[in-house]
């Protein structure tokens, strides 16, 4: 068939080797790629210097606002030391960070294991959907903090309680996003797959799932935000480890430099995780970020 | 069934859609009766919204019928089948797949018993046919509208289906490429003996490609007139066709039929 290819098409020959050109590393290109980071860095450095100056010259009670340098010093020390073997309490930020981070990851993993299949099933089967959706909406609309006393009653001041709170915080955005992804799968894509012979399983695996993947990732992104709230709340309420607990204890002992150090660490952790999922979403679904008219 | 019996038969076909939030039905197509012979090229024209897409969706098995019947080779259409392929008006390419992978899709869903090497060869041929060689690894969002539609055409041709349903396949393609694609289409259909049901807004395209042009009226969609086109093939490469008196007459005739309908559209009937 190809041998008798229509000659008139040749004039639109599209595989000209010059079509794809190296961008190269000119100064302009380097600046274009790094200017965001540069601007953010200058902005942040200015912010912390101003903070430092305000505390030094502004006659502010260091109990309320420590110097930025003290906060960084506390953070550095806290992240580079560990509690000695057998210590009852740890003053090391790293120990508490690892506790919180591990709990968060564990909780998120469980939330994904429940939320993703749950959402996919609800999107894919209208009976499951109508049975489960009232409960999902009820629990999703309930402020999750309201459940904390109940979980403490059930599980005590344990890691299990903390993880349960993270799971219950993170599971609904993940579930609802996966569900919405399935429901909004473009009808024309399903039609095309059906016309070319896809059966129900193939429709689900080859069309609905890939279509839903970016939705799932943005669900996880929201889950991270909620999960972090869950982490801190669970640790503020009870327990003797974790960043939430450390905030509580450092504030109780008037160590505000430590409190601010932990807050900063929470911000950095949250932003890093959320930016990672943003990047992941853009990576798996580049077509969503194209502004074609 | 003998060889020359019609391959697609619609009898008193009615298609209706339920209206959102109303206990009413919109009749999109009413009492369509049409028989398409094997190897025939049938073109549907009519104002926007008259039910052309609904009709080929009924043949492809995507849309249920309200009453009447559609048969393909004598058996009632209840869903899509490997004997029918379709080019979609809105391309319907999977955005997470490359051009090549989109074109290969029908092979994944249909077991045609052909070897992997044969499949690769078909993919290559079809991409060459629609002039997309070099874009195998591109994603649909990186292509222009016309290029996307050419991917859709390659995907429909890949399995060599008996029946090709095409919903305004060349609408988004620029005039020069369109002419080349039309010639290509005519050649493919002549060569493979495929039966084609083709929708277009272009009356020239209808006359150049069609053995018969079906003019559909507006709301509810009914067959207004069936116009036979008897120019010898190939027509695309024959400049005498477009300049002939019969061509101009046919064009005027169909244009008047469609214009009547379109003006009713404007009056909001
Ligand atoms: N899924 C649908 N639900 C409700 N109405 C529809 C649907 N698809 C098409 N219609 C209606 O049916 C009529 C015919 O549509 P269509 O077959 O797409 O026409 P055409 O392809 O000729 O433009 C239109 O009035 C349209 O609004
Ligand atoms: Mg249409």
Image: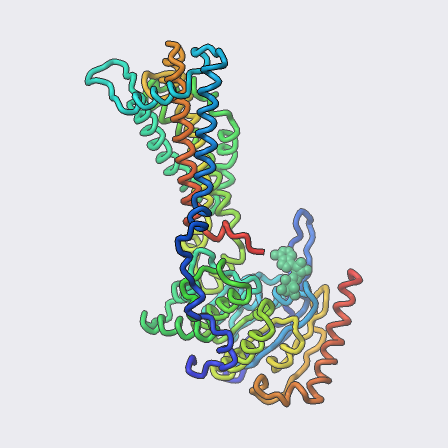
Closer to the camera in the image, B17 or B96: B96
Q: Residue at x 40, y 71 (%)?
A: B123
**Residue B74 % position (x, y):** 52, 75
* Picture colour scheme: rainbow
Looking at the image, which residue is at 48% across and 47% down? A182
Quadrant assignment, res B254? bottom right
Residue A225 percent across, percent down from the top left: 45, 31
Image quadrant containing the C terminus of chain B: bottom right
Taking the image as shown, residue A238 lies to the left or right of residue B94, namely left
Quick check: B235 above or below A32?
below
View quadrant of ligand 1: bottom right
**Vertical comparison of A12 with A117: above or below:** below
For residue B101, side relative to residue B265 (left or right)? left
Q: Which residue is nearer to you in this view: A198 or B66?
A: A198
Q: Can residue A234 be seen by looking at this rendering?
A: no
* Extreme-right residue of the structure: B267
* Residue A139 percent location from the top left of the image: 49, 29
Quarter-of-image position of residue B55: bottom right
Q: Residue at x 57, y 74 (%)?
A: B178
Number of marks in the image? 0
User: Can residue B231 be seen?
Assistant: yes
Image quadrant of residue B29?
bottom right
Q: Position of residue B144 (x, y in %)?
A: 53, 63
Q: Nearer the viewer, residue A52 or B251?
A: A52
């Amino acid at each position: 068939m190809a041998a008798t290819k229509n000659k008139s098409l040749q004039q639109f020959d599209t595989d000209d080797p010059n079509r794809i050109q190296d961008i190269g590393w000119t100064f302009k290109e380097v600046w274009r790629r790094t200017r965001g980071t540069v601007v953010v860095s200058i902005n942040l450095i200015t912010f912390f210097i101003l903070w430092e100056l305000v505390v030094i010259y502004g006659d502010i009670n260091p109990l309320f606002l420590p110097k930025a340098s003290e906060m960084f010093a506390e953070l550095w020390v806290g992240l580079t030391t560990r509690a000695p073997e057998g210590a009852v309490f740890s003053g090391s930020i790293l120990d508490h960070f690892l506790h919180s981070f591990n709990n968060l990851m564990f909780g998120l993993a469980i939330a994904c294991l429940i939320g993703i299949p749950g959402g996919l099933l609800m999107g894919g089967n209208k009976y499951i959907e109508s049975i489960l959706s009232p409960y999902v909406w009820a629990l999703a609309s309930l402020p999750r903090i309201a459940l904390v006393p109940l979980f403490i009653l059930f599980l005590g001041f344990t890691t299990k309680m903390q993880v349960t709170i993270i799971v219950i915080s993170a599971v609904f955005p993940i579930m609802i996003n996966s569900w919405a992804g399935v429901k909004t799968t473009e009808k024309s894509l399903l039609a095309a797959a059906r016309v070319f012979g896809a059966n129900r399983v193939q429709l689900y695996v080859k069309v609905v799932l890939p279509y839903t993947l970016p939705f799932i990732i943005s669900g996880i992104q929201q889950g991270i935000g909620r999960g972090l709230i869950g982490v801190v709340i669970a640790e503020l309420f009870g327990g003797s480890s974790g960043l939430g607990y450390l905030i509580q204890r450092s504030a109780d002992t008037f160590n505000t430099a430590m409190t601010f150090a932990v807050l900063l660490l929470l911000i950095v952790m949250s932003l890093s995780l959320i930016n990672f999922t943003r990047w992941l979403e853009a990576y798996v679904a580049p077509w969503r970020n194209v502004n074609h008219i | 069934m003998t060889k020359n019996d019609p391959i697609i038969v619609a009898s008193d076909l009615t298609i209706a859609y339920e209206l959102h939030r109303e206990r009413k039905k919109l009749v999109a197509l009413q009492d369509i009766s049409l028989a398409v012979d094997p190897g025939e090229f049938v073109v549907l024209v009519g104002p926007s919204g008259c039910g052309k897409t609904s009709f080929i969706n009924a043949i492809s098995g995507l849309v249920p019928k309200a009453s009447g019947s559609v048969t393909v080779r004598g058996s009632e259409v209840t869903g899509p089948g490997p004997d029918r392929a379709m080019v979609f008006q809105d391309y319907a390419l999977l955005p997470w797949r490359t051009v090549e992978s989109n074109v290969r899709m029908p092979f994944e869903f249909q077991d045609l018993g052909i070897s992997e090497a044969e499949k690769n060869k078909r993919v290559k041929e079809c991409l060459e046919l629609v002039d997309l060689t070099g874009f195998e690894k591109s994603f649909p969002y990186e292509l222009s509208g016309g290029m996307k539609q050419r991917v859709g055409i390659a995907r429909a041709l890949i399995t060599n289906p008996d029946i090709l349903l095409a919903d305004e396949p060349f609408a988004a393609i620029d005039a020069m490429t369109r002419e080349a694609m039309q010639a290509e289409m005519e050649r493919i259909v002549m060569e493979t003996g495929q039966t084609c049901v083709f929708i277009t807004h272009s009356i020239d395209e209808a006359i150049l490609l069609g053995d018969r042009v079906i003019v559909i009226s507006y709301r509810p969609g009914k067959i207004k007139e069936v116009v036979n086109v008897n120019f010898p093939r190939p027509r695309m490469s024959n400049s005498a066709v477009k300049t002939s008196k019969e061509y101009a007459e046919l064009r005027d005739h169909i244009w008047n039929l469609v214009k009547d309908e379109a003006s009713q559209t404007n009056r909001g009937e």
